[in-house]
């Protein structure tokens, strides 16, 4: 394996809690039931698809204009939470693991559905450690479509079979497998059947790849 493609939210950091709080505030303001079980379906999927999942319980139709206003509101609150992010919010062992993989000559990329990915990487102090960032601003189809990981591999000048994808979401493992990648699951995705490998901690990648 010459390249490692990391999902961001849920793998390198836990911004998923901030997504939850921001969506919950929006759902509460609209009187729509929303809890952590429904929230788990939002992992790895785009903000548009996330809103559609939340609105399944709305009991009324919302116009495209109203939905645009909902994204705006949710993203504004989410960005308020993100502004407090720092190196402390990196997943345990993430910085050391990234440095060791780089020292071993591995190419590193981010493959995230988020349009806030660059901002998050900068707040976490790890933006400079990646050779490429494929994110929600550069793709048309979000996970489980493999587009974001195929773009990351292309930016690294590698083929999918030369890369391992590290993911915490079922939709992300499905995307990795659909793209022809080796898929390592961490967090919620460890129970995902098509994963090739299950990780308890990120630093296991060093033993696996170096
Ligand atoms: P944004 P990932 C995903 O990030 C999140 O898991 C998902 O919950 C979110 O809806 C999506 O990014 C879009 O995020 O609203 O910031 O553009 O797991 O692919 O890194
Ligand atoms: Mg994720």
Image (spheres, rainbow, N blue to C red):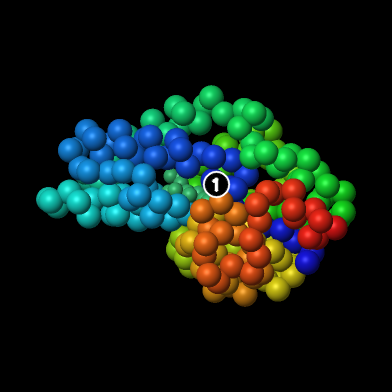
Ligand 2: does it lie within 8 Å of the C-beta at label 1?
A: yes
Residue in the foreground of this view, choosing between 111 and 59: 59
Query: In the rendering, at what x and y percent does residue 143 appear?
Result: 48, 62
Residue underneath mark 1:
10
Residue closest to the far top: 84
Please state which of residues 61 and 137 is positioned toward the viewer in this rendering. 61
Q: Nearer the viewer, residue 85 or 199?
A: 199
Residue depicted at 60% across the width and 54% down the height? 186
Residue 209 appears in which quarter of the rendering? Answer: bottom right
Say above or below: 167 vs 65: below
Relative height, residue 88 to residue 36 (above, below): above
Q: Is residue 136 visible?
A: no
Number of residues whose C-alpha sits closer than 10 Å to that of mark 1, classed few (under 14), some (14–19) or many (20 or more)? many
Q: How many marks?
A: 1
Residue drawn at (38%, 34%) of the image: 21
Instruction: Evaluate whether residue 120 shows in this view.
Output: yes
Residue sitting at x 53%, y 70%: 193
94 relative to 67 in the view: left or right: right
Q: Is residue 97 above or below residue 56?
A: above
User: Which residue appears at 22% of the width and 33% of the height?
Assistant: 29
Could you say where residue 124 lies in the image, as x and y percent from the top left?
A: 64, 34
| Position of residue 111 in the picture relative to residue 163 (left or right) | left
Mark 1: which secondary structure?
Answer: loop
Q: Residue furthest left?
A: 60
Residue 205 screen position, x and y as percent = 75, 55
Q: For the N terminus, give its image quadrant.
A: bottom right
Could you tell whether 19 is left or right of 38 in the image?
Answer: right
The C terminus lies in which quarter of the figure? bottom right
Indicate the position of residue 159 as horizontal and vertical percent values: 71, 72
């Amino acid at each position: 394996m010459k390249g490692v493609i990391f999902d961001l939210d849920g793998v390198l950091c836990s911004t998923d809690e901030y997504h939850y709080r921001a969506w919950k505030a929006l759902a509460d303001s609209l009187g729509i039931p929303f809890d952590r079980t429904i929230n788990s379906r939002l992992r790895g999927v785009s903000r548009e698809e996330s809103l559609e999942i939340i609105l399944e319980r709305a009991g009324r139709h919302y116009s495209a204009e109203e939905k645009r206003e909902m994204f705006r509101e949710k993203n504004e609150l989410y960005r308020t939470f993100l502004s407090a992010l720092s190196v402390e919010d990196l997943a345990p062992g993430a910085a050391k693991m990234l440095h060791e993989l780089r020292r071993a000559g591995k190419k590193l990329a981010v493959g995230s559905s988020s349009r806030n990915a660059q901002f998050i990487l900068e707040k976490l102090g790890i933006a400079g450690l990646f050779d490429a960032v494929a994110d929600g601003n550069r793709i048309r189809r979000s996970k489980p479509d493999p587009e974001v990981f195929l773009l990351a591999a292309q930016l690294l000048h590698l083929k999918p079979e030369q890369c391992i994808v590290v993911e915490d979401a079922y939709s992300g493992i499905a995307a990795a497998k659909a793209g022809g990648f080796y898929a390592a699951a961490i967090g919620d995705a460890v129970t995902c059947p098509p994963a090739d490998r299950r990780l308890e901690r990120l630093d296991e990648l060093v033993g696996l790849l170096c």
